[in-house]
Amino acid sequence: MEKDSIHAKGELEVTLFDENMNVKQHFTTHNVVTSFGRNILASTFLGDGAFARPTMMKIGTGTTGASYTDNALGSVLATATLDANPDNASLFGVRSANSITYSATFNPGNGTGAVTEAGLFSATNNGTIFNRTVFNVVNKAAGDTLTITWTVTIN
């Protein structure tokens, strides 16, 4: 019998632009899909609607490593609504094959500071965390724009 296992993983593309939209910083990093995130996936397979899908992205200043048991960011700096699906304005994220891509933009004045973590959430307040990552500092000045594109792959 062939053995198979399903894994969920995420990768972020982080881009910081200055006030003239010149790239100041750009990198990719991986994340941890939390136990809550895995419950969301299982709920989706069941179609029971027990968990809301991600609609928000939060950034913060926490530096404790990401863990499967995380239920929040270390220290929230700002929240942004995920960009709408260009093919369906009522949905967040774009699905392709075995992945879904979420993106959010933190405009000038939103999230100013030393950003070191990010997470996907189902709501602004008391939302369920889907995944979380910690990365090297991104110093977002007041006039800067930060975009994060987050691809979650099931393989």
Image (cartoon, rainbow, N blue to C red):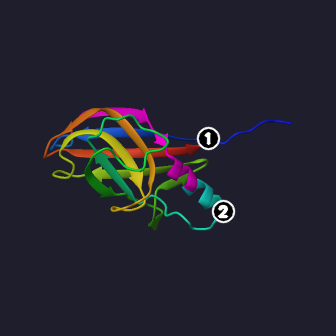
Is 24 on the left-hand or right-hand side of 127?
Answer: left
Asked whether the beta carbons under mark 1 and mark 2 sit within 8 Å of each other, the answer is no
Q: Residues within 10 Å of mark 1 (few under 14, many from 20)?
A: few
Res 47 label: none
Is 34 on the left-hand or right-hand side of 6?
Answer: left
Part of the protein shown in magenta: 22-39
The residue under the point 61% across, 48% down is: 97
The residue under the point 42% across, 38% down is: 66
User: Identity of the amino acid at label 2?
Assistant: Leu
Q: Residues within 10 Å of mark 2 (few under 14, many from 20)?
A: few
- Looking at the image, is 37 positioned above or below residue 22? below
**At numbered mark 1, what does the secondary structure look like: helix, strand or loop?**
loop
Q: Residues under labels 1 and 2: Cα distance?
A: 17 Å
Is 155 on the left-hand or right-hand side of 1?
Answer: left
Residue 132, picture quadrant: top left
**Residue 138 located within the stretch drawn in magenta:** no
Residue 124, picture quadrant: bottom left
User: Identity of the amino acid at label 1?
Assistant: His
Q: Whole-percent x and y of residue 145?
A: 22, 46
Q: Nearer the viewer, residue 145 or 33?
A: 33
The residue under the point 60% across, 60% down is: 43
- Residue marked by disc 2: 46
- Residue marked by disc 1: 7
Q: Whole-percent x and y of residue 48?
A: 62, 68
Q: Whole-percent x and y of residue 73?
A: 34, 47
